[in-house]
Image (cartoon, rainbow, N blue to C red):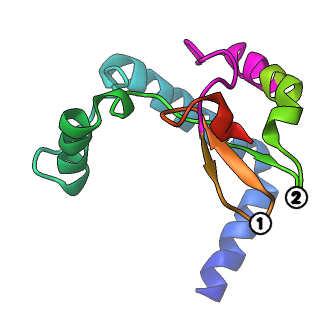
């Protein structure tokens, strides 16, 4: 194998323009084949009966609001502080997220949430909860 690679390297070094030309022809050929026979990209691939398909079905029946393309942003308060004292910063963060390309809607601001114990004092998730008093 050592001898083969040595000969290949010498060939490529001696005839570098030829090798570059061959690579360009290969790339152009692949692009042309892709344009002629490639089809289109699809983002709805499913495998019926798979674990992820079963999980998606459970989400759709048990938690319909979480089964779509949605997400939550969790904010944490510093140790000894209340998250409600950082409401302006959180609202600014939510506003910045709402301006991202693929974000369709945001909830606006912290209004309801659940305080989750952690080493940094607490975190707020934007769904469910006990009302604004549960924030801090």
Q: Is residue 94 magenta?
A: yes
Residue 115 on image: x %, y %: 64, 48
Residue name at image x 77 percent, y 42 percent: 17
**Residue 2: mark:** none
Residue name at image x 69 percent, y 38 percent: 135
Q: Is residue 71 left or right of residue 78?
A: left
Q: Is residue 52 left or right of residue 122?
A: left
Can the viewer see residue 21 in this picture? no
Work out whether residue 50 or residue 120 is closer to the camera in this orientation and state it: 120
Work out whether residue 88 or residue 18 is closer to the camera in this orientation and state it: 88
Decide whether the magenta segment is chiefly helix, strand or loop: loop
Image quadrant containing the C terminus: top right
Q: Which circle's residue, 2 or 1, is located before the other in the chain?
A: 2
Q: Is 44 located above or below residue 3 in the figure? A: above
Which residue, given by chain and number where applicable, does mark 1 sit on? Answer: 119
Marks 2 & 1, CB-CB < 8 Å contact: yes
| Segment colored magenta | 93-113
Which residue, given by chain and number where applicable, does mark 2 sit on? Answer: 79
Residue 97 on image: x %, y %: 72, 22
Image quadrant containing the N terminus: bottom right
Rendering quarter of residue 120: bottom right
Q: Assess disc 1: are there few (<14), some (14-19) or many (≥20) residues with their C-alpha within 10 Å of its C-alpha.
A: few
Residue name at image x 48 percent, y 34 percent: 128
Q: Is residue 89 magenta?
A: no
Element type at marker 1? loop
Spatial distance from mark 2 to mark 1, Cα to Cα? 7 Å
Residue 107 on image: x %, y %: 59, 17
Residue 78 on image: x %, y %: 88, 52
Element type at marker 2? loop
């Amino acid at each position: 194998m050592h001898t083969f690679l040595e000969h290949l390297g010498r060939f490529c070094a001696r005839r570098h323009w030829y090798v570059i030309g061959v690579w360009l022809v290969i790339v152009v050929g692949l692009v042309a084949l892709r344009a002629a026979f490639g089809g289109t990209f699809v983002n709805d691939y499913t495998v019926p009966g798979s674990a992820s398909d079963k999980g998606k079905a459970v989400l759709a029946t048990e938690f319909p609001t979480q089964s779509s393309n949605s997400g939550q942003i969790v904010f944490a308060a510093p140790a000894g502080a209340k998250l409600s004292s950082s409401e302006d910063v959180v609202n600014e963060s939510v506003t910045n997220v709402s301006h991202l390309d693929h974000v369709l809607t945001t909830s606006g601001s912290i209004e309801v949430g659940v305080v989750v114990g952690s080493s940094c004092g607490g975190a707020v998730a934007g769904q469910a909860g006990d009302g604004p008093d549960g924030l801090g």
